Image: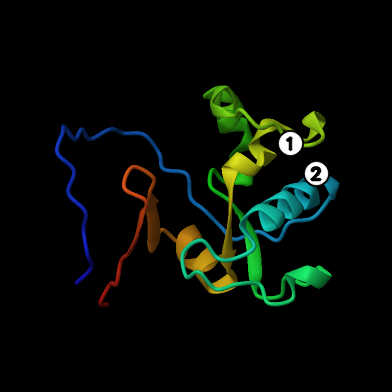
Amino acid sequence: MGRYSVRIGSVSVTDEVPLICAVSLPSGTRVESFRDAVFQRDRRCVITGNKAMFAHVGRWRGFEATHIFPLAYERQWDDCNLSRLITVPPADESHGSINSVQNGIMLTSVMHQFFASYDLAINPDVCRARYSRFRG
């Protein structure tokens, strides 16, 4: 049985289609600059606390810069005007606000897979991570 977080307030059911996440390998200069900015800021997995031991020589093996709002859904990002939440634009603004360091976290490869599959969630209101364990 998994752990569940209960929040006081109202809950409503909608017919909104969820955005399905997938781990994608970053490629291209616009995503590389995002990755570099996240790595330089975090320098460790924000969930496990594991440090990138060879960060001082630019080696980040086992770590991934993860988009909080998935890059694959940049169109929805734009449609919902989520750029209004960004106060630190990417170094090259032509890369799009979705690639702001504010939309990223550094995770180990394993934690990234859990995050992308919704087995791991982060509640920014309480600075706590939740991991669901399903029996099947």
Label 1: which residue?
Answer: 90
Q: Is residue 124 above or below residue 22?
A: above
- What residue appears at the point 47 percent right and 44 percent down from the top-left corner? 19
Residues at badges 2 and 1 in contact (C-beta under 8 Å)?
Answer: yes
Q: Position of residue 49 (x, y in %)?
A: 50, 69
Residue at point 54% right, 27% down? Answer: 85
What is the count of numbered marks? 2
Q: Residues within 10 Å of mark 2 (few under 14, many from 20)?
A: some
Which of disc 1 and disc 2 is earlier in sequence? 2
Number of the front mark, 2 or 1 = 1
Q: Quadrant of residue 73?
A: top right
Query: What color scheme is it?
Result: rainbow
Tag 1 secondary structure = loop
Residue 30, disc: 2
> Which x, y percent locates residue 13?
22, 35
Identify which residue is drawn at 15% across, 33% down: 9
Q: Nearer the viewer, residue 55 or 15?
A: 55
Q: Position of residue 59 (x, y in %)?
A: 78, 72
Q: Quadrant of the C terminus?
A: bottom left
